[in-house]
Image (cartoon, grey):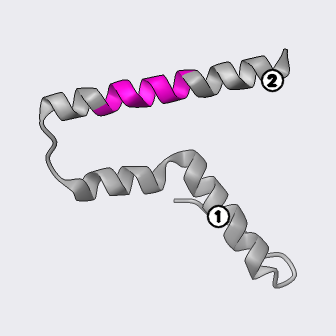
Amino acid sequence: MTKVIVHNGNLDGAMRTLKQRNAKSGLQKEIRERLEGYQKPGVKRRKAREEAIKNSRKKNREYNRAA
């Protein structure tokens, strides 16, 4: 469970922080996958492959930006 502290009544900043932390932890994605229900093994492999390609492109982009 993600916790965020509200400082000086700044609710907007706390909400933004909460959304960022949830996005990084993958909580929303996990909930969405659970609600989809059963996936056939081929569909599961295809999604895993697409996710791996997306992640590798993202890492390459970050690596090229740092160099």
Question: Residue 11 appears at what percent x and percent y?
Answer: 74, 80
Q: Which of 45 and 31 is in front in this view?
A: 45
* Secondary structure, magenta segment, majority class: helix
Residue appearing at x 64%, y 64% in the figure? 18
- Quick check: is 55 in the magenta stretch? yes
Q: Residue at x 30, y 50 (%)?
A: 33
Tell me what residue is drawn at x 44 percent, y 24 percent: 52
Question: Residue farthest to the bottom?
Answer: 9
- Disc 1 residue crowd, few under 14, some 14–19, many 20+, Cα 10 Å: some
**Foreground pick, 5 / 22:** 22
Q: Is residue 52 above or below residue 26?
A: above
Between marks 2 and 1 in the image, the one whose residue lies nearer the viewer: 2
Secondary element type, mark 1: helix
Q: Residue 65: give its label.
A: 2
User: In the rendered image, which quarter contains the C terminus?
Assistant: top right
Q: Is residue 8 above or below residue 51?
A: below
Stretch in magenta:
47-56
State if disc 1 and disc 2 touch (CB < 8 Å).
Answer: no
- Give the percent coordinates (x, y) of residue 31: 36, 57
Q: Give the residue at mark 1.
A: 18
Camera-side residue of 39 and 24: 39
Residue 60 appears left or right of 30: right
